[in-house]
């Protein structure tokens, strides 16, 4: 892994990643997976279930070093990498605010978090404990923690999975508001095309396993204009370009 220069994008070039199953069979999860995310861009990795999306994120987060190939992370004001997972991993014995502050480097621990908590609608919940939060609120706290660190790159692994559609939609819009306040190079894994079209600057479409890039779709509409009818049109445009995609 290398840290690239300030203007460099996230660059991924994974030659191969295999797993060995419990019965000794080799599973090729990724083969020839190459893509880039430009600086300050919000990209979605979209692909069918089991194609290798989470495997890719785990490699980029440094959680899995058993692969062939290379990648480089963008360098911002910090070298920090932040991640938001499907399950918000919060320390149960710490309040929401403490969970956020503990993620910060020491020199930022006293930072003013009012506007971040405000944007995410968490101002009144700062002193609650995780057990007092609904799943939607816990996800918001996880987003607050990720953005508070002002990372150079943000990875999100299906952060809106298993929420009811209304809550998920509210959270997607909150994510965009907080992201717009400080655009951060971001890579989000999803298998939800509409979600990707709502959030992303560009969609990186993956094949079934072993994952490789089938194509790139740059979403041709400003984010604030992506209402329901506009999203219907974007879905059609996407399917026209990738008729076989999910
Ligand atoms: N630790 C492991 N051991 C063996 N096989 C694994 C392991 N982790 C993942 N796999 C296999 O690698 C493939 C890719 O898994 P991965 O979780 O990356 O897919 P995904 O695209 O994130 O799927 P989903 O959208 O369902 O979360 C799958 O076939 C999975 O079964």
Image (cartoon, grey):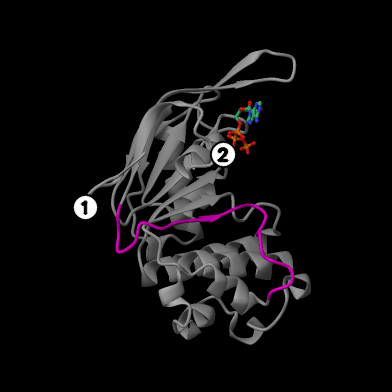
Pointer 2: what residue? 54
Q: Residue at x 64, y 52 (%)?
A: 86
First-in-chain label (2 vs 1)? 1
Taking the image as drawn, is residue 163 in sight?
yes
- Examine the rendered structure and indicate whether residue 147 appears above or below residue 200: below
Q: Nearer the viewer, residue 205 or 243?
A: 205
Task: Name the spot of residue 226 as percent of width and height, x first.
Answer: 43, 60
**Residue 96 lies in what quarter of the image?**
bottom right
- Examine the rendered structure and indicate whether residue 155 appears above or below residue 130: above
Task: Name the spot of residue 156 as percent of width and height, x first.
Answer: 52, 52
Q: Is residue 97 left or right of residue 152?
A: right
Quarter containing the C terminus: top right
Characterize the local packing of mark 2: few (<14), some (14-19) or many (20 or more) Cα atoms within 10 angstroms: some
Q: Quadrant of ligand 1?
A: top right
Q: Residue at x 53, y 36 (%)?
A: 64
Characterize the local packing of mark 1: few (<14), some (14-19) or many (20 or more) Cα atoms within 10 angstroms: few
Q: Residue at x 44, y 81 (%)?
A: 111
Residue 44 magenta-drawn? Answer: no
Disc number placed over residue 7 in the picture, else none: 1
Label 2 near ligand 1 (CB < 8 Å): yes
Q: Which residues are magenta?
A: 75-94
């Amino acid at each position: 892994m290398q840290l690239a220069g300030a203007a460099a994008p996230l660059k991924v070039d994974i030659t191969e990643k295999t797993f060995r199953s419990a019965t000794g069979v080799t599973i090729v999860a990724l083969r020839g997976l190459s893509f880039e995310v430009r600086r300050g861009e919000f990209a979605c990795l979209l692909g069918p279930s089991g194609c290798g999306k989470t495997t890719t994120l785990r490699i980029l987060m440094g959680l899995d070093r058993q692969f062939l190939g290379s990648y480089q992370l963008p360098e911002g004001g910090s070298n920090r990498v932040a991640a938001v997972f499907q399950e918000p991993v919060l320390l149960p014995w710490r309040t929401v605010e403490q969970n956020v502050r503990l993620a910060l480097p020491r020199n930022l621990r006293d930072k003013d978090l009012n506007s971040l908590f405000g944007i995410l609608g968490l101002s009144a919940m700062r002193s609650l404990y995780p057990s007092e939060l609904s799943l939607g609120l816990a996800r918001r706290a996880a987003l607050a923690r990720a953005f508070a660190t002002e990372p150079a790159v943000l990875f999100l692994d299906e952060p809106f999975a298993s929420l009811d559609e209304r809550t998920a939609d509210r959270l997607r819009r909150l994510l965009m508001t907080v992201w717009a306040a400080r655009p951060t190079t971001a890579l989000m894994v999803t298998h939800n095309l509409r979600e990707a079209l709502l959030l992303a600057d560009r969609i990186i479409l993956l094949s079934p396993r072993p994952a490789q890039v089938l194509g790139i779709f740059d979403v041709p509409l400003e984010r604030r204009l992506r209402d329901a009818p506009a999203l219907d049109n974007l879905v059609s445009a996407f399917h026209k370009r990738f008729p076989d995609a999910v």
